[in-house]
């Protein structure tokens, strides 16, 4: 399905969360022009949505048609209730992409793509007793904050082995984009 001007994204029931790719403004390695100067080539813009149909989708902007094309459905089954929020991790120039999605059933799924064009996999599934309402990355992308329906916010850090561990605010390094109030907007 496609979304053009005046058309919104999502499957049945509408969109619960929408986020743009954090690195969409990052230039890809350019090619030299006829004078030998390097040119900058921007990667296609991408969005991620989550909706009432329990699905997480990635959309790519087509410059020629100026429309958004539904380019990828993340594997179904991670969420058993509507997806309330999605967030694309800032990647600071590394080729990997990571998306967090959360749902009314208390599940937070962390999706990873090693390089653009490769398959997305579910790297981690975090389960909570309360509904997961919002996910947000720190400015550096090293900490994931999860807001729950019981007014609790929990923080997670990725370990060197790729697993995710619950973090305490006093354990985080300064400069993580975290302050005493939580994740810096």
Image: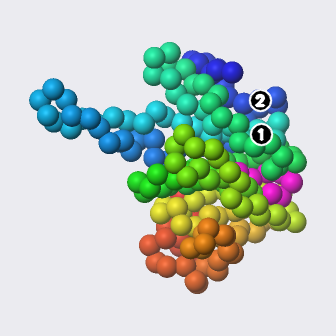
**Where does the image place residue 125, in percent across and percent down from the top left?**
76, 60
Above/below status of 142 relative to 114: below
Q: Residue at x 59, y 50 (%)?
A: 113
Q: Which residues are magenta?
A: 101-107
Is 75 situated left or right of 111 in this image? right
Towards the viewer: 37 or 148: 37
Above/below status of 58 relative to 122: above
Judged from the image, the secondary structure of the residue bearing numbered disc 1 is: loop
Quarter assignment of residue 68: top right
**Where does the image place residue 76, in percent across and percent down from the top left?**
80, 42
Judged from the image, the secondary structure of the residue bearing numbered disc 2 is: loop
Towards the viewer: 42 or 182: 42
The residue where tag 2 is placed is 11
Q: Which numbered tag is attached to residue 55?
A: 1
Is 15 situated left or right of 167 in this image? right
Distance from disc 1 to disc 2, alpha carbons, whole Å, reads 8 Å
**Where does the image place residue 184, in percent across and percent down from the top left?**
53, 63
- Outermost residue to the left: 35
Above/below status of 107 relative to 40: below
Crowding at label 1, few (<14), some or many (≥20) Cα neighbours within 10 Å?
many
Q: Which numbered tag is attached to residue 115?
A: none
Is 103 situated left or right of 169 in this image? right
Crowding at label 2, few (<14), some or many (≥20) Cα neighbours within 10 Å?
some
């Amino acid at each position: 399905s496609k979304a053009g001007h005046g058309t919104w994204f999502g499957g049945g029931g509408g969109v619960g969360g929408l986020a743009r790719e954090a690195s969409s403004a990052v230039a890809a390695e350019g090619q030299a022009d006829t004078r030998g100067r390097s040119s900058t080539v921007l990667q296609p813009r991408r969005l991620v949505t989550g909706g009432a149909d329990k699905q997480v989708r990635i959309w790519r902007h087509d410059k020629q048609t100026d429309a958004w094309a539904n380019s990828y459905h993340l594997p179904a089954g991670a969420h058993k209730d509507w997806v309330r929020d999605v967030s694309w991790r800032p990647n600071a120039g590394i080729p990997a992409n990571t998306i967090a999605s959360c749902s009314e059933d208390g599940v937070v799924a962390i999706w990873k793509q090693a390089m653009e064009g490769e398959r997305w996999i579910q790297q981690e599934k975090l389960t909570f007793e309360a509904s997961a309402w919002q996910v947000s990355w720190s400015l550096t992308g090293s900490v994931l904050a999860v807001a729950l329906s019981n007014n609790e916010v929990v923080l997670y850090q990725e370990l060197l082995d790729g697993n995710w561990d619950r973090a305490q605010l006093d354990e985080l390094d300064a400069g993580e984009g975290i302050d005493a109030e939580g994740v810096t907007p």
